[in-house]
Structure formats: structure tokens, C-alpha cells
Image (tube, rainbow, N blue to C red):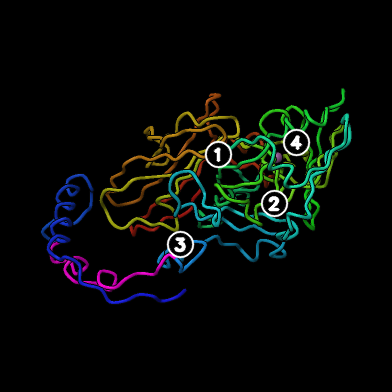
């Protein structure tokens, strides 16, 4: 950055103080926990001139691509080095407690790679469609971008999100237990239009999607889903997809486990049977109590988590707070979220932030007065099909404890008298 700051005249101090006190008077009555206007008048943050009041800031030429304030440098993705064998086949978790609304900024979207982040020159990237089609097709990126497109907000959740927690509370962290879910506005060409263009042959029941990364990630998707809402996406939140999210082209399979949204998409093959790839036989299956494994469990069912407070965002003394969190379901829209502060004995219905979109994260919020002592914070999501998020004991009655994937049980945070928040399992 170039430092082009120059001294400038002090601000008109009188008008600044007048507008500041007017603001305080107007909001003091509604902001629970705010300092009184009288106490604030002696606050040096108000009475002392700061550098930024007196000197010019950086010019518009200081940075071509904007970055967050340096005061926000703790809002980052984090990984757990011991969790995986290498950084190239690993997970980077999103800091859910620092986000607002339902959009995940592109630099904070969780990452999951199986062969590192492929760095692809878009001029050398192709998408091939072949197999049981009338005409086999190869698209350049220019071809894809010239076609009609759509934009949709969808959540993406790794099937292994919360996967450590089956046998009891493990990691004392919202980021590491829930941070493998994110939401973006994806822009691309609906896959059904590409399939229509190629002409699907009678008897084609499945597609195979393949990535161009070093792992050659492949998954099978039923033709009904491929002809429904799957996107072949080239943009994420208004800009090109980030390299770690599959630049320049990826599949977005709304509501299904994240692994199926193949990144760095290079090939789609149509066939009459599932392809039984490693990632749907050895991995991404759910081992049951009797030793059998469930396969092709695709939909991420209704789930929710309280993101504030949480272990990383403790409570600072008694008083007024809001409990906030996120809910999502692969079956459509979130219909209702209930919150309990006593471990599920009593429930209140939270307010949902608009808009509530299908297969998208929904933010919920409820006011809370912390009166000290222990509090057990739980959230419970319901979706538009009537499905209710289960407790862990309800989930284990069906699934046992051998699973890694598809843990959508209710989460409990214990607020203890010091204000610290712990990940606990209710008996
Ligand atoms: Co599954």
C-alpha cells in the first residue's frame, strides 16, 4: 500500500459531539446493556481526537482487490492438523460465530480437498459430456459462459460435519464441530439444459461427475436429481469461483452431501447403473450397528446450531443477549426453529431472518436474559416437510454409534457461571 495520508484540518468538533449524543439518546432506550449517555460523555473514545479524525486515509489506489479491516484478522478458517494425514487431503473450517446473515464470504467458505487445490488455467479447461447421450459434447469455459444461466443461494455441507460427535462431545468448538457448512450464491448453467442439448438416451439412469484435481474425485448422481436443480457453476457470490471451491467450474448439487458437488468439474458420463466409485462405497457410507453400511445417503437433513454464544464466543456476565444461530435442510425450506435455555425442558420459537430460501442456510435469533448459573442452550430445527431435527439418542436408536457421516442431532452448549461455554452431551 502507498501511504498517501496527509495532515488535514481537525473535524468540526462541536457538530461531531452533537450528532454523537443525539445518536446515544436515540438508541440508549432500546440497546440493552449500552452505557448511559451520561457515562459515555466522559469516554475518551468520544472526547479525544484520533488519528483517523485528523489525517487523510488511504487513497482508492491503495488496493485493487479489497480485504477486511486489519482489526478483523481473527476471523479466519482454521484446520486441525492431527485430524488428517496431510494438508492436501484435509478440511478448513468456517468461523460460523463471526458471520452474519446467511451468506458465507468467499474467503471464509469451508474447504474440503482430497488432492489439494487444483490450479487450473481456464483456457485449458474443458467439460466433456458423454456415455448414453445422442451426441457427445465438449465445452470450453467460453462456451459455458455464453449459455443462459441462473443464480441461486444454496448451502453446502460436508457429510462429515459434526462427525466427531457420535460417541459424545469431543471438540470444544463451534468452528471445528459445525464449520463444514457454508452458503453462497452460485451462478451457472442448469445441468438439465446441458443434458437436453446432448440428448439423454432411453435407459440412462445415472450420471458420473468427475473432477480435474489430482484426486480425480468421482461421484454418481441419479438422473432425476441431475434433471432437477443441479447447477454447473462458474461464479460464487458474484465473482469467479475461488480456486479452493473448484475454479473455474464445479457442480452444485443442492441439499445433497457436499462431496457430490464435484469441484474442478471436467467430465459427466451417463450410464444405466451407479458407478460405485471409491467415494460412495469405501467412503461416504454409514456403518450401522449390525455391520451393514447404508449407501447413497445423499440428503443433508434438517440441522441447526447456536453460533452465539458458543465455546469461542463466551457470555460476558449477567444481562441481555441475543441467541443466534443457523439452520438448514436439504429437503427445502426451514419452517421453524425452537430454542431452549434449560436443556430442552422448555422451548421458545425463534425469529427467522428473511428471506428464508430453499436448501439455503436460515438465520434464527431470540432475545435472552442470562441470570447467572448454568444454562443449557439447545436449538431444534423443523423443515417444510414436517421433519424435526432429532436428539442424539433418537438418532443413535436408528444409526448406532459407528457412523461418521450425517450427524444432524441437536447440539447443547453449557454456559457455566464464569460465562465460558462448553460443548456437552445431554444424557
Ligand atoms: Co451420505
Measure how far apart labels 3 and 1 are at the Cα level: 23 Å
Q: Along the polypeptide, which appears first: circle 2 or circle 1?
A: 1
Specify whether residue 218 is in view: no
Total number of numbered discs in the rendering:
4
Which residue in the protein does label 4 denote? Answer: 296
- Viewed as shown, does residue 209 lie left or right of 161? right
Residue 68 in which image quadrant: bottom left
Measure how far apart labels 2 and 1 are at the Cα level: 18 Å
Numbered badge on residue 2: none
Which residue in the protein does label 1 denote? Answer: 153
Front disc: 2 or 3: 2
Extent of the magenta region: 41-60
Measure how far apart labels 2 and 3 are at the Cα level: 24 Å
Measure how far apart labels 4 and 1 are at the Cα level: 24 Å
Which residue in the protein does label 2 denote? Answer: 248
What's the magenta bit mostly, secondary-structure-wise? loop
Measure how far apart labels 4 and 2 are at the Cα level: 27 Å
Numbered badge on residue 68: 3
Q: Along the polypeptide, which appears first: circle 4 or circle 3?
A: 3
Specify whether residue 180 is in view: yes
The answer to whether the residues at label 3 and label 1 have Cβ atoms under 8 Å apart is: no
Residue at figure coordinates x 37%, y 42% from the top left: 341
Amino acid at each position: 500500500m502507498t501511504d498517501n495520508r496527509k495532515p488535514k484540518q481537525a473535524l468540526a468538533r462541536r457538530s461531531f459531539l452533537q450528532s454523537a449524543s443525539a445518536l446515544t439518546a436515540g438508541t440508549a432506550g432500546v440497546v440493552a446493556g449500552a452505557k448511559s449517555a451520561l457515562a459515555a460523555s466522559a469516554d475518551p473514545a468520544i472526547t479525544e481526537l484520533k488519528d483517523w479524525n485528523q489525517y487523510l486515509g488511504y487513497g482508492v489506489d491503495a488496493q485493487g482487490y479489497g480485504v477486511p479491516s486489519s482489526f478483523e484478522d481473527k476471523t479466519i478458517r482454521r484446520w486441525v492438523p492431527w485430524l488428517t494425514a496431510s494438508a492436501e487431503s484435509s478440511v478448513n473450517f468456517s468461523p460460523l460465530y463471526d458471520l452474519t446473515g446467511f451468506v458465507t464470504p468467499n474467503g471464509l467458505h469451508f474447504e474440503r480437498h482430497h488432492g489439494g487445490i487444483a490450479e487450473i488455467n481456464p483456457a485449458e479447461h474443458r467439460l466433456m459430456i458423454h456415455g448414453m447421450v445422442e451426441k457427445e459434447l465438449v465445452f470450453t469455459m467460453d462456451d459455458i459462459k455464453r449459455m443462459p444461466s441462473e443464480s441461486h443461494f444454496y448451502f453446502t455441507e460436508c457429510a462429515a460435519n459434526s462427525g466427531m460427535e457420535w460417541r459424545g462431545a469431543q471438540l470444544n468448538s463451534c468452528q471445528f464441530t459445525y464449520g463444514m457448512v457454508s452458503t453462497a450464491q452460485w451462478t451457472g448453467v442448469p445441468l438439465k439444459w446441458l443434458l437436453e442439448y446432448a440428448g439423454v438416451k432411453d435407459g440412462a439412469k445415472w450420471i458420473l461427475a468427475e473432477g480435474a484435481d489430482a484426486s480425480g474425485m468421482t461421484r454418481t448422481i441419479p438422473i432425476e436429481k441431475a434433471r432437477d436443480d443441479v447447477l454447473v457453476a462458474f461464479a460464487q457470490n458474484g465473482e469467479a469461483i475461488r480456486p479452493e471451491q473448484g475454479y473455474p467450474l464445479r457442480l452444485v448439487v443442492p441439499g445433497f452431501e457436499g462431496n457430490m458437488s464435484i469441484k474442478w468439474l471436467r467430465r459427466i458420463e451417463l450410464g444405466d447403473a451407479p458407478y460405485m466409485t471409491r467415494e460412495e462405497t469405501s467412503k461416504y457410507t454409514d456403518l450401522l450397528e449390525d455391520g451393514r453400511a447404508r449407501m447413497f445417503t445423499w440428503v443433508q437433513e434438517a440441522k441447526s446450531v447456536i453460533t452465539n454464544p458458543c465455546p469461542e464466543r463466551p457470555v460476558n456476565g449477567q444481562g441481555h443477549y441475543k441467541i443466534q444461530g443457523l439452520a438448514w435442510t436439504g429437503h427445502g425450506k426451514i419452517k421453524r426453529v425452537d430454542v431452549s435455555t434449560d436443556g430442552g425442558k422448555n422451548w421458545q420459537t425463534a425469529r427467522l431472518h428473511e428471506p428464508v430460501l430453499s436448501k439455503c442456510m436460515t438465520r434464527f435469533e431470540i432475545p435472552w436474559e442470562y441470570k447467572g448459573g448454568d444454562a443449557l442452550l439447545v436449538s431444534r430445527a423443523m423443515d417444510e416437510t414436517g421433519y424435526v431435527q432429532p436428539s442424539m439418542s433418537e438418532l443413535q436408536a436408528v444409526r448406532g454409534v459407528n457412523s461418521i457421516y450425517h450427524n444432524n442431532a441437536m447440539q447443547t452448549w453449557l454456559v457455566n457461571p464464569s460465562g465460558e461455554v462448553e460443548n456437552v452431551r445431554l444424557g
